[in-house]
Image (spheres, rainbow, N blue to C red):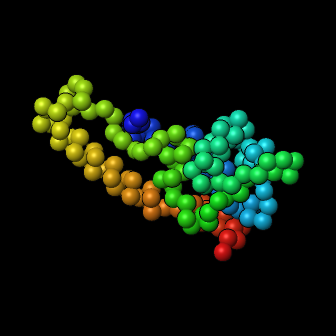
Amino acid sequence: MRYRHYLGEVITNKSYYGLAALVHLAVAGRERLIGVKEIASNRSLPQRFLELTFSRLRSLGILNATRGAYGGYQLARKPTEISLKEIILACEGLRELTLPDTNRGSLGAGDPIGRTLTNLMNQQLAIMEANLEAVTLSDVIEQSGQAAEMYWI
């Protein structure tokens, strides 16, 4: 099944919440496991949402989870190895970033203006994807001013 998403809707609160939680894990969770409740409380994020998102992040190899009374989550990889694109796709529940269905209305295959617009938008989408792939969790932490707190080697 192919997911479709409008460019303007790609980065929603889901991505923001997931990214904020991953920043917290990278900064505070290097040497210990951190529970969803702690992250939700410290970052003022919805706990139920984080539980669902962390399940996806774990299945995609971004997080490691340990169950039990002393369980919690840690990053499965270094922050320098986790791209913003991976995070957004996981948090939004997408497999890929795509344009809306262009086979309807004025953007149909037989419309040269619609075809041109679609081609231009696909080019912009490719640029955005490349940029999101190039930015890592580590970059986000550094640019947000929290890099001094992170001590991943």
| Residue 69 in the figure: left or right of residue 124 | right
Q: Which residue extends farthest bottom?
A: 153
The residue positioned 81% from the left and 51% from the top of the image is 71
Pick the residue in front: 52 or 117. Answer: 52
Looking at the image, can residue 146 be seen? yes
Pick the residue in front: 95 or 106. Answer: 95
Where residue 98 appears, as percent x and y from the top left, is 36, 41
Placement of 63 over or under 81, stated as above or below? above
Q: Quadrant of residue 107?
A: top left
The residue positioned 28% from the left and 46% from the top of the image is 122
Pick the residue in front: 32 or 132. Answer: 32
Placement of 26 over or under 52, stated as above or below? below
Where residue 118 appears, as percent x and y from the top left, is 23, 40
Identify the image quadrant of the C terminus: bottom right
Where residue 39 appears, as percent x and y from the top left, is 75, 48
The residue positioned 69% from the left and 67% from the top of the image is 150
